[in-house]
Image: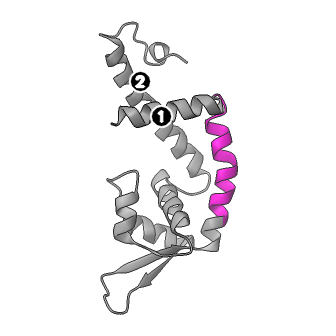
Amino acid sequence: MRLEDEIMQKKFKSELHKLLVNIIYTGNWLNSAHSKFYKQYGLTPQQYNLLRILRGQHPNCATVNLLTERMLDKMSNASRLVEKLRKKEYVKRIECPRDRRRVEVTITNKGLKLLKEIDDIEYEKNFNNLTIKETKQLNDLLDRFRG
């Protein structure tokens, strides 16, 4: 659906102004859709992101600092997210015997299985209206936009 119809605004100052509003609107729309999607798995988007990072590190562990650096939502508290995921048995926390402040985290088989289940549905559902060529073009444009 067109942005003008979604937000009920007929005119913009310029195409650049419309682009800015469109990016903000689309980001919020995507966040809302993802929140609803992950909720059926008992996850938040931030928890899902943390699991994805840990899957990328697997079979190695990751420190909480590394998780914080790599998270998409920089406002999230990685330690709190790790604890919630630990209670669900999706991750394990390993305290370093030499430095009790240092905690390493690894994804469990249960966490890997959950991600596999989500992956099979998520990409199909969210991007079925774009071709592979359009998806690559949009990725390239967004990368250029961020500089």
Main secondary structure along the magenta-highlighted residues? helix
Q: Position of residue 39 (x, y in %)?
A: 56, 51
User: In this figure, which residue is indicated by the disc labeled 1?
Assistant: 140
Check disc 2 and report its element: helix, strand or loop: helix
135 to the left or right of 62: right
Q: Position of residue 112 (x, y in %)?
A: 63, 66
Residue sitting at x 53%, y 63% = 56
Write the residue at 52% across / 62% down. 51
Whether residue 119 is visible: yes
Residue at the spot 55% in from the left edge and 18% down from the top edge = 1
Name the quadrant containing residue 55: bottom right
Q: Residue 27 shows which numbered tag?
A: none
Q: Identify the mark nearer the N-term, 2 or 1.
A: 2
Does 121 appear in magenta? yes
Q: What's the residue type where badge 2 is placed?
A: Asn
Q: Nearer the viewer, residue 98 or 139?
A: 139
Residue 106, compared with residue 122, is above or below; it is below
Identify the colour scheme used.
one colour
44 in the magenta segment:
no
Residue at 47% across, 40% down: 31
Where does the magenta region start and end?
113-129
Total marks shown come to: 2
Q: Residues within 10 Å of mark 2 (few under 14, many from 20)?
A: some
Q: CA distance from mark 2 to mark 1?
A: 17 Å
Residue situated in front as seen by the camera: 58 or 94: 58
Up-down relation of residue 19 to residue 37 (above or below): above
| Tag 2–tag 1 contact (CB < 8 Å) | no
